[in-house]
Image (spheres, helix red, strand yellow):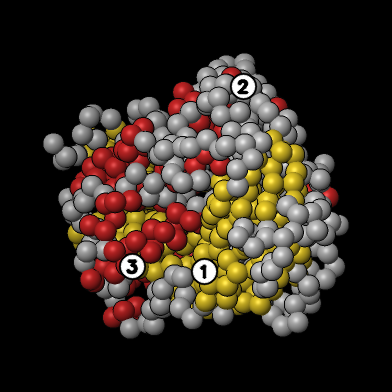
Amino acid sequence: MKAVTILASLLLTASAFAGVKTETIAVLMRDGIKLATDVYRDDAVTKAPVILMRTPYDRTKAKGSAERWAKAGYVAVMQDCRGTRASEGVMAPYNNEGQDGYDTIEWITRQPWCSGRVGMMGGSYVGAVQWQAAAENPPGLAAIAPQATWSSFYRNLYLGGSVRLALISGWIGGNTAKPEGVKPADMNEALLRLPLSDVDEAIGWPMPWLDAFLTHPEPNGFWTRLDLTSRLPELQLPALHVVGYYDFFSRESVDNFMIMQKQARDPKTRQQQRLILGPWDHGSVGKTKTSEVEFGPEATADTFALQLDWFDRHLKQDPAALSKPFPPVRYFSIGDNVWRDAQTWPPEGFTSTSFYLHSAGKANTRRGNGSLTKEAPTKDQPNDSFHADPGNPAPSCPVTQARPLKAAVWGPVDQSATEDRDDVLVYTSEPMAAPLTFAGNAEAKLHVSTDTPDADWAVKLIDVHPDGFAQNIARGILRGRYRNSLLKPELMQPGKVYEITVDLGPVAATIAKGHQLRVDISGADFPLYDRNPNTAEGIFSNKTAVAAEHVHHKPGALSRIVLPIR
């Protein structure tokens, strides 16, 4: 039975916004668990559409946002997810959010102050619960605004078979109760622990969910309950998708938009999707600065205003909102720092163009002889090689006193110090004679070999400024054994040359005149991604091997970067 009821109406409090009252209610789920829920209503509004936010991060922190929604003519409902803050139950990441979302929405639509139309908003975990609830088809859910989130949890955590180690270890460590008196260990050391099943012990206490996530590197049945992607086309639901290029959710969020716009069974739903793609990481959405780069005032975005317009359009069905221009895609171009509109992602009018790797066999470090041109090699060139040592992995970004290894960031930072390592291959173009503009999904097609049964290839796309600042604009990684299939890994034969494709994700940028385009290739991107032990002995082994990795670039083995150029 999916019906839910009010258990208790606890408190009405005056809001800082005149006329807004807050009522705290315990809402009963189908299994008897009660979830703490705050309802914000303006005295002047008797019945209105509802904005729902379900969060594991303390519903009361959303008070200011909720009051703004109430003054904008909505009823705002803020709820602690199961097992968090004031809600009952046990927190099992994402495990109950679909049914709890359904039950909450059903309860909302039965309240006298609800017009019958409900929207959901929020980002990250708070965005994922929207897709989980939507997949249950609750009556009354009329629009969502998921920001920086997933529809497949596996694809959120894993890329090319490599897991986003620092992300999930830090998140679960921060959201798992610590035994009394236990202090977390040094995360720099914990992230280096092998096998991965021991990372929680290295941090300081048992975390079963972390063990489970880290020891299932393939998208098999373990992940089925948290894979909603195949159900998205069945939804009849307007969705506002917001994410940044530097967000670890960028691929997932953009893919969700593309699925809904191109594959939704309902033609009207295809026309009710919007993507906002900016120069942000997970914590800087809407801001002008991400990590070490200031993108200027144009980079700002008022997410509340975007959501208000969206819900006025789809919940209130307000004529003024419906009459506004509605470009399906609005994306920011890094470098020239301007917004552009498009009908689809990838945008039309761009052509896939190859930039080929060249060297005289010594592309190691930024002072090596690696180069990048539009011309393919016409004669044999010696391959480039480096040693990938799991004991000393290439870092995700340069380690500094202010930014230790564990604090690696996804955003743009000067990569120069990392490019001084001998285990990083660097290929750089001549300075641009004219601006180079591209927008779409970038990839690296490499011809590689190794002397171990498995190895990783991590690739970064770089904009080199005239002053030498090496700004990462896209990145990707591929674990060799997953080169053909994530479900059916195949070990690598030592010395055999394979063509691999490394997904670099969505990106839009202009490499300005006088700047240079650069590609960095290494055997690790740690700790944003876990290290490959290179032994292929399995996820529960702690043995490692140093891999001698090679990148080939010659006729018949043309290693290259493929960019959608205008």
In percent of width and height, residue 124 lies at: 47, 49
Tag 2 or tag 3, which sits nearer the N-term?
Answer: 3
Image height check: is 345 above or below 411?
below
Q: Residue furthest front?
A: 379
Amino acid type for the residue under numbered disc 1: Gly
Q: Quadrant of the C terminus?
A: bottom right
Q: Distance of mark 1 from mark 3, alpha carbons? A: 16 Å
Question: Between residues 554 and 244, which one lies in front from this camera angle?
Answer: 554
Identify the residue at image location x=22%, y=64%: 265
Can residue 58 be seen from the camera position used here?
no
Question: Between residues 49 and 132, which one lies in front from this camera angle?
Answer: 132
Mark 1 residue element: strand
Disc 3 and disc 2 in contact, CB within 8 angstroms: no
Tag 3 or tag 1, which sits nearer the N-term?
Answer: 3
Give left or right: position of 357 versus 46: right
Identify the residue at image location x=47%, y=75%: 347
Q: Which mark is residue 261?
A: 3
Amino acid type for the residue under numbered disc 2: Asn
Q: Which mark is residue 542?
A: 2
Can residue 546 be seen from the camera position used here?
yes
Quarter of the rendering containing residue 561: bottom right
The residue where tag 1 is placed is 440
Identify the residue at image location x=53%, y=59%: 505
Q: Distance of mark 2 from mark 1, alpha carbons? A: 39 Å
In percent of width and height, residue 207 lies at: 50, 24
**Few, some or many residues within 10 Å of mark 3 (<14, 14–19, 20+):** many
Identify the residue at image location x=34%, y=55%: 120
Q: Quadrant of the N terminus?
A: top left
Amino acid type for the residue under numbered disc 3: Gln
Tag 1 or tag 2, which sits nearer the N-term?
Answer: 1
